[in-house]
Image (cartoon, helix red, strand yellow):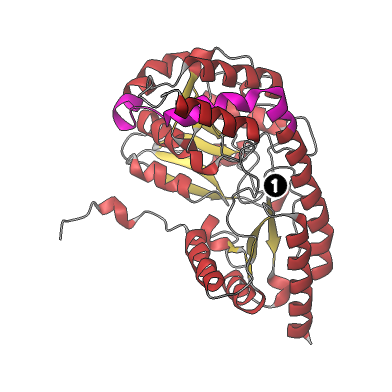
Amino acid sequence: MPRLATRTQDFLTFQVMNLFKQAQALQAAGEDIISMGIGEPDFTAPPPVVAALDRASRSGLSGYTAAAGIAPLREAIAAFYGKQFGAAIDPSRVIVTAGASGALSLACAALVDPGAEVLMPDPSYPANSNFILGAGGLPRLVASSAEKRFQLSADDVRTHWNDATRGVLIASPSNPTGTSIAHDELAELLQVVRERDGFTIMDEIYLGLSYDHAPKSALTLDDDLIIINSFSKYFHMTGWRLGWLIVPESMVSTIDKIAGSLSICAPTLAQHAALACFEPESLAVFEERRRAFQARRDYLLPAFEKLGLTVPVKPDGAFYIYADVSSTGMDSQTFSQRLLLETGIAAVPGHDFGPAHARKMMRFSYATALPRLEEAVDRMDRWLTRIKG
């Protein structure tokens, strides 16, 4: 057996995938499973995008592209950021990638030296730690709290920055909490990192799914950030494996060089199809679906309170609710397993997202149609009543 690299021992297992497999097995056995686990929209690409894919395929547009992506798509993304998120950027700074995962891989390869520490809040999306580890770095989770909206703060950076620290990786809105960083607090955090000559990798994958305020990119505060985004969540194209980076002009040639070796290019047909995402007809569909996600959130929050599942911070984006289940007398692992086996509802225990709140917190996804969420609440109500009974 080949000897594995030592760092493989440190890679985190994404438990939600194990839960997903377990739920699939139950479904295959005839169980009616309601998914509140995996973060995948129940919507798919709208008709104009599917039609664009068909045209691209029939036209033979399936060869390699430039490592940074096709120029029309880079221009469309730049224009979208200006119109939707208030950030005027040159298209040359946009690098089209094989999903947000490809974007994070490139960013970490370019920025993270062996042994370098990168600060992240606890809770965080677990795969982010693995991208840092893959580049030879050391992810360092900083326990956050409801008072901080479960986000990293400027004071956290001041307190935990040391000689080995090189930067931060943050997300707004966040997975698993659905919370955003307030604009003034984000400005302070970015300034503290800049004062230390550090980098900020900013995950804006869920920025388009903001509900209580007009979304603004962090680029409106600092133009030297590394932005991660994707066509998976707001554009509902998870399996198309298409995302992008926005980097400072000084990094473009380096990222282009790395991308040319590690991925050659993002999926070509997906790139041509994604141009249709920015047509008025498609944008109208995405806005209608954004409102549908908001309606689901607005249904679930009071429903959870009635069930006794406390939501410490109201999520203002994404499609997740981070809820405290300790009132049930169960830890999150037990709650998750019993919920799946006894009610047919899949939801993720907090252990996936860091140790600070692992035992008592659960992530519930509302990327599922409202009637199914209503059924889930009804099942949980009957189940919890029986348990307390």
Query: Residue at image x 43%, y 34%?
Result: 98
Q: Quadrant of the C terminus?
A: bottom right
- Residue under circle 1? 149
Comparing 154 with 79, the one in front is 79
Residue drawn 50% across the image and 36% down it: 168
Classify 24 as above or below 137.
below
Instruction: Give the percent coordinates (x, y) of residue 99.
Output: 48, 36
Magenta-colored span: 258-284
Q: Residue 3's spot in the image, x, y percent? A: 17, 56
Q: Secondary structure at mark 1?
A: loop
Q: Quadrant of residue 254?
A: top left
Neighbour class for label 1 at 10 Å: few (<14), some, many (≥20)?
Answer: many
Hey, which residue is sitting farthest left in the picture? 1
Q: Magenta stretch: dominant SS?
A: helix
In this rendering, position of residue 338 left or right of residue 285: left
Quick check: can you spot residue 114? yes
How many marks the image carries: the answer is 1
Is residue 276 highlighted in magenta?
Answer: yes
Residue 138 visible in rendering: no
Res 45 quadrant in image: top right
The residue drawn where x is 37% and y is 16% is 253
Q: Nearer the viewer, residue 327 or 161?
A: 327
- Asked if residue 280 is among those painted magenta in the image, a careful observer would answer yes
Residue 50 lies left or right of residue 264; in this view the side is right
Where is residue 349? Give x, y as percent: 58, 64
Relative vertical location of residue 384 with respect to residue 266 in this rendering, above or below: below
Amino acid type at circle 1 is: Arg
Q: Residue at x 50, y 25 (%)?
A: 272
Q: Is residue 228 left or right of residue 97?
A: right
368 vs 171, left or right, is right
